[in-house]
Image (cartoon, rainbow, N blue to C red):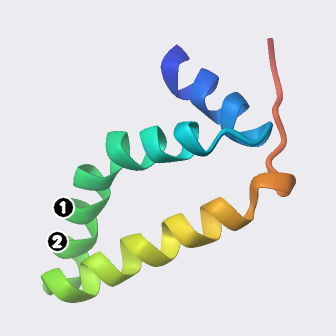
């Protein structure tokens, strides 16, 4: 989606609001997926949290390709 790409660019260049939007847009899906894989809601929440913490820390590593 174009909106996700815009949010990713904004996040890459320092927008904390963009990170919050990315989290809000994807957390439900990621929670459902991880809960289905782990069969444990608490562990699923921990995994999703850890993923977003790592994502937030990778701001400088993100490569933007394409037009």
- Tell me what residue is drawn at x 50 percent, y 19 percent: 3
The quarter of the displayed image where residue 24 is located: top left
Tell whether 54 sits left or right of 52: right
- Tell me what residue is drawn at x 55 percent, y 46 percent: 19
Q: Percent position (x, y) of residue 28?
A: 22, 52
| Dot 1 crowding, Cα within 10 Å, few <14, some 14–19, many 20+ | some
Tell whether 33 sits left or right of 47: left
Q: Which residue is mark 2?
A: 36
| Contact? badges 2 and 1 (CB < 8 Å) | yes
Q: Percent position (x, y) of residue 41?
A: 14, 81
**19 lies above or below 55:** above
- Tell me what residue is drawn at x 24 percent, y 64 percent: 31
Q: Percent position (x, y) of residue 44?
A: 26, 79
Q: Which residue is mark 1?
A: 32
Q: Percent position (x, y) of residue 29?
A: 25, 51
**67 lies above or below 20:** above
In this orientation, which residue lies closer to the viewer: 13 or 3? 13
């Amino acid at each position: 989606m174009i909106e996700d790409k815009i949010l990713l660019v904004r996040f890459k260049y320092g927008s904390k609001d963009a990170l919050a939007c990315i989290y809000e847009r994807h957390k439900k899906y990621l929670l459902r997926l991880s809960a289905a894989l782990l069969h444990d809601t608490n562990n699923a929440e921990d995994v999703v949290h850890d993923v977003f913490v790592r994502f937030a820390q990778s701001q400088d590593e993100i490569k933007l390709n394409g037009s």
